């Protein structure tokens, strides 16, 4: 049995400053696997807004310019589907938000 693991840090293809995105509390978030929509939500559905998240994180460490806070994912995560769904080799996961990012398992993760 072969085990493949990968730590992926997906922020691309670009990280933009707040003045380039408009309202951060009203951004579409979509995830497609092989072209099939699996997640479709909006940042206005997040439990905590940006200011609350930054305030909470700042209690534990000092944030520096360029720091990135990863907040999780919208509803529709594969592990909680009935039956559960997981990415497999040669599947393509496309995440769309403000900018378009595309990662394929053929590029080194499964």
Image (cartoon, rainbow, N blue to C red):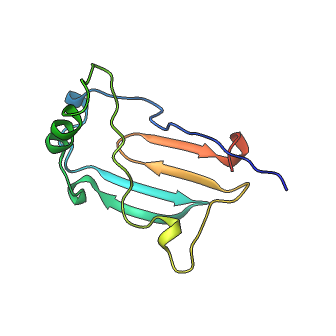
Residue that lies at the very extreme toward the right in this rendered image: 1
The answer to whether residue 37 is left or right of residue 109 is left
Residue 10: x %, y % from top left: 49, 38
Residue at the location (27% across, 20% down)? Answer: 64
Residue shown at the point (26%, 53%) measured from the top left: 43
Figure check: 68 above or below 97: above
Residue 88, x across and y down, in percent = 69, 59
- Residue 45 in picture, x, y percent from top left: 23, 60
Q: Answer above or below: position of 34 versus 58.
A: below
Q: Is residue 58 left or right of residue 37?
A: left
* Nearer to the camera, 108 or 34: 108
Residue 42 horizontal side relative to residue 10, left or right: left
The image quadrant where one finds the N terminus is: bottom right
Residue 74, placed above or below residue 71:
below
Residue at the outermost top position = 65
Q: Quadrant of residue 83?
A: bottom right
């Amino acid at each position: 049995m072969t085990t493949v693991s990968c730590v992926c840090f997906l922020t691309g293809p670009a990280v933009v400053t707040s003045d380039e995105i408009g309202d951060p509390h009203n951004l579409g978030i979509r995830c497609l696997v092989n072209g099939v929509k699996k997640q479709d939500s909006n940042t206005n559905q997040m439990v905590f807004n940006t200011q609350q998240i930054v305030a909470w994180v700042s209690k534990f460490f000092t944030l520096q310019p360029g720091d990135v806070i990863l907040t999780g994912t919208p509803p529709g995560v594969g592990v909680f589907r009935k039956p559960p769904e997981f990415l497999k080799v040669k599947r393509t996961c496309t995440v769309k938000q403000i900018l378009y990012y595309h990662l394929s398992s053929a590029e080194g993760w499964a």
